[in-house]
Structures are given as C-alpha cells and as structure tokens.
Image: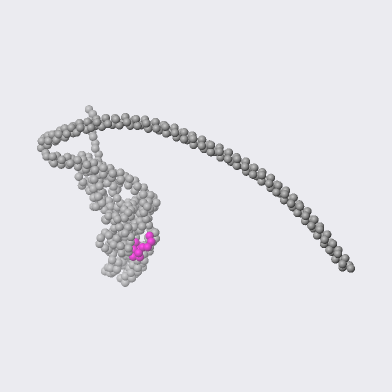
Amino acid sequence: MQIVWALIGAVVGGGLLLGLLTILGKNIIQQARLEAQRLRDTAEREAHSKAREIELAAQEERARAREAFEREADAQRKELRELELRLNKREDTLDRKLDTLSVKERNLETMEGRLAQRERGLAAREKQLEQLIADERNKLLQITQMTAEQAREVLLKRIEDECRRDAGLLVQRITEQAQEEARDKARQIILQAIQRYAAEQTCDHTVSTVAIPSDDMKGRVIGREGRNIRAFEKATGVDVIIDDTPGVVVVSCFDPVRREIARSSLEKLVQDGRIHPARIEDLVSQTSKEMEEELVRIGREAVQEANVGNVARPIVPMLGRLAYRTSYGQNVLRHSIEVGYLAQVIADELGLDGALARRCGLLHDIGKAMDHEQEGGHPQIGKAFLKRFNEPEAVLNACEGHHGDVPATTPYTPIIMAADAISASRPGARRESLERYIKRLQELEELAMSFEGVRQAYAIQAGREVRVMVDAKLVDDAVAAKIARDIARKIQDTMTYPGEIKVTLIREVRAVEYAR
C-alpha cells in the first residue's frame, strides 16, 4: 500500500514538475521573443541612421567632386584662352616676318644683280692684272738675264734657307723648353732620392802593405837566396816588393782578391814566425779557402742589405769580390748597393718597379769582379756573366748600357745611369791624383777650343762644368745650341770622367758707342 502511494506521489510530483517546466519554458520563449523584437527595432533604427549618414557623405563627396571638376574646367578654359592669345600673337609675328622676308628677297635680287655686274668687272681686271704680271715677269727675266726655272730655283733656295733658320729656332725653343721641364722634374726626383738615402761621405783606400816588426823578420821573409819570397810569389801570384823602407813590405797585383790573400797570408806568416816554402804553401791554401768563404759571406750580406732575392749561387761570390775592388778610391760593392737604393727611390717616384731597379743597381758593375781575367769592358763582361743565369732583360741592359755603350731598351737603364752618376759624384765618394785632375781640366778646355767659332773655354766646378765663349759674329743662336750639343757628345765619346759634365755656351753681343 505504501508503495502504491509512493508511486501515486511520484506521478503527481512528475506532473507538477512537468507543468512547472512548461510554464517556465513559455515565459522564457516569450521573453526571448520580446528581446528579439527589441534587438530588431534597435537594428532597424541603426540601419536607418547609418543609411542617412552614408547618404549625407555621398552628397558631400558629390559636391566636392563637382567643385573640383568646375575648378579644373575653369583652369582648362583659362589655359585655352591663354593659348588662343599666344596663337594670335604668333600669327601676327609670322605675318610681320613674311613681310620682312618679302622685302629681303627683293633686296637680295637687287644685290645679286649688282654682284653679277661686279664679277664681270673683276674678271676683266683679273685679265688685266695677269697681263701686267706676265709683262713684269718678262721684264724681270730680261733684266736679270735668268730663265723662269732659274728664278724659281733662286726663290725656292731663299725660302728653304729662311724655313731652315725658322726650323732651327723652333727646335731650339722646343729643346730649351723640354730641357727646362725635364731638368726641373729630374732635379726634384734626384733631390728626393738623395735626401732619402744617407751614405757615408768617405771613400775607401786599398792598402797593399804589410808591417814587418824588424829587419830580421824581413830577412826571414826573403829567405836564403830568396827562396821564401819566390815560393810566396809562386803560391799567391803576386809581386812582393821589399825595399829600404823600414818596417814595410809592399804586395803588388792587378787582382785585388789575390792581393788580399797574399797580404793576409803574409801577415799570418809574420805573426807565426815559421817561414819556409812548405809552410807558405799550406798557409796560402788555407787563406784561399777562408777567402772563398769570406767572399760568399760578403756577397750574401750584400744581397740581404740590398734586399734582392733569388740570386744565383755563382753570382754571390762575385759580389763579394767587388768588396776588394775600388774605382777612383770608391769601394765598388758599396757603390753598387748605393746605386741600388738610389735607383729604387727614382723608380718609385716614376711609378716603376722599385725592386727590379734595386736589382739592376746592385748587379750593374758585376763585370768589375772579373774584368782583370777576361778581355773587354766590364759592362760587356758583366752582361755575358749574368745572361748565363737568366737574369731579366732590364738587368742585362742596365749592366751593358749604364755607360751609354748600347742604346737603352728599358726605362731602368737611364735610371741606373743617373743613380751611378749620383753615387760617383757625391762629395767624398771618389778621389783622383792632382796630376790626373789637372790633365783632365786641360783636356776639357782643349776639346772645347777645337770647335770653330769658340774664342775661350774654361773648366770650372772641379771639372764638372765647362764654359765656352763663342764669337757672336760667326755664331748665331741656332748654331750656338748645336755647338753645345757637339761639345757634350765629343766629351762623352773621347773622355773618361766620373759623374757628368755640364757644357754652358755663352754668346754675347756688345754694342759700344761714344757721345761727344
């Protein structure tokens, strides 16, 4: 029974719950409908408002576009009016020009008629002038008793002389200008090279004497019946001069290396005291080997000092030999290194290869290391030696042509010639005897006096310059320049001198009058 009541209660409760839920659903649906209607009304109001705003904006945009169009149309109408005015003005101008051209055309026709009449008159006068010229020519030929060909030759000869003189003056002027410009540029480059290179201002003196402590030691050097001195001369290939001069023995030889070996060997013999032929041979052989090693050492140091790489091995000892060779008292190896540095500076200033110029300078006098053993001058000997080791063409030409024996084929040859002259002519670089110095000055003056038209010649600046006075009546300006060049060339061809010699030719005209 309780279960039945429970079931009835459950059914009744479920029905009530269902009714309640139905009522709540209807209320919710009713509220949703009301909210939807409200939202629809709000959206319609906003849509109408937005549409109104869009319509107003469109009206404003249409108004602005209309105003812009009207402004543009006004501007175009204004441009058209201005263009119309310009066209009207141009039309008026063209009309005036047409009138002017018509007037000018009529004037030209009148002038053409006058010109035609004048041409006819000129043609008649030209015929008269030709006839007069022919008559005058015939009269001149009758007076001079010459044919037309002869007169033409005389005239051409005169014109040729005048042109030749003018050409000489032109050549002289151009030459002077070029020399002045080249002299200024060369002076700047050379001065800069000298300033950048600092070298000692002294020259080397080769001494081939050996000090002997006593006359007893001098006798031991000579040996019994001269056997020691003969053995020494045979082993070294030098001449030993022993005279009455106390404490000195002179070693003489044209080969500076052999002379140095002999001097060093003799000094060692004197210090050792044991002097006999066997000892002499052993000591000279030992000294020769030491000298070979010394030559290689000196050559390597020279290559390193000059900063020249890839030098063939046989060239190195030849550079060492230059350390014992002198020219006018100047050490040839030091001179070669100095020329290399100067050549590098000059080449760098000219935009060339400074390393190649330095190599040319170091090797340019290599022939002096062997010129006492071979025939020929040291430039040719040096070139033949360097050619065996595939040295560059610039080095070969600089070696052979640095004294002007052959034409320069590369720009490095004249650079080496200039650097060689700078190194040789700087103060303290070289020395020469007084007699030789005076003789060279006399030869300079006599050479200059041998030319026709030269009145006086003076060697000045220690033989670095020769001043030549010419007769102004016999020599004009063009010929004076030629005489100066001929003197300079003859000096180059016939004389031997360090550095360069300047030739200054002076032509002076003096006019003297007396007022009484």
**Can you tell which quarter of the image residue 262 is in?**
bottom left
Query: In the orientation shown, which residue stands out farthest toward the top?
Result: 516
Q: Is residue 315 magenta?
A: yes
> Which x, y percent locates residue 475?
21, 41
Q: Quadrant of the C terminus?
A: top left
**Magenta span has 62?**
no
Residue 298 in view in this figure = no
Q: Nearer the viewer, residue 414 or 219?
A: 414
Task: Give me the residue at 15% from left, 40% from top.
Answer: 152
x then y, percent, for residue 488: 25, 48
Q: Quadrant of residue 416?
A: bottom left
Q: Is residue 330 above or below residue 177?
A: below
- Which range of residues does the magenta coloring cover? 308-322
Whole-percent x and y of residue 131? Answer: 15, 34
What's the residue at 53%, 37% (across, down)? 70
Check the image and name the residue furthest to the right. 1
User: Of residues 406 and 153, which is closer to you in this image?
Assistant: 153
Color encoding of the figure: one colour
Indicate the quadrant containing the N terminus: top left, top right, bottom left or bottom right: bottom right
Residue placed most toward the observer, 291 or 143: 143
Question: How far across and how far down the image is residue 179, in percent?
Answer: 30, 46
Closest to the observer, 477 or 232:
477
Q: Can residue 284 be seen at all in this image of the molecule?
A: yes
Q: Residue at left 20%, top 47%?
A: 450
**Image quarter of residue 266:** bottom left
Q: How many marks?
A: 0
Classify residue 337 as left or right of residue 489: right
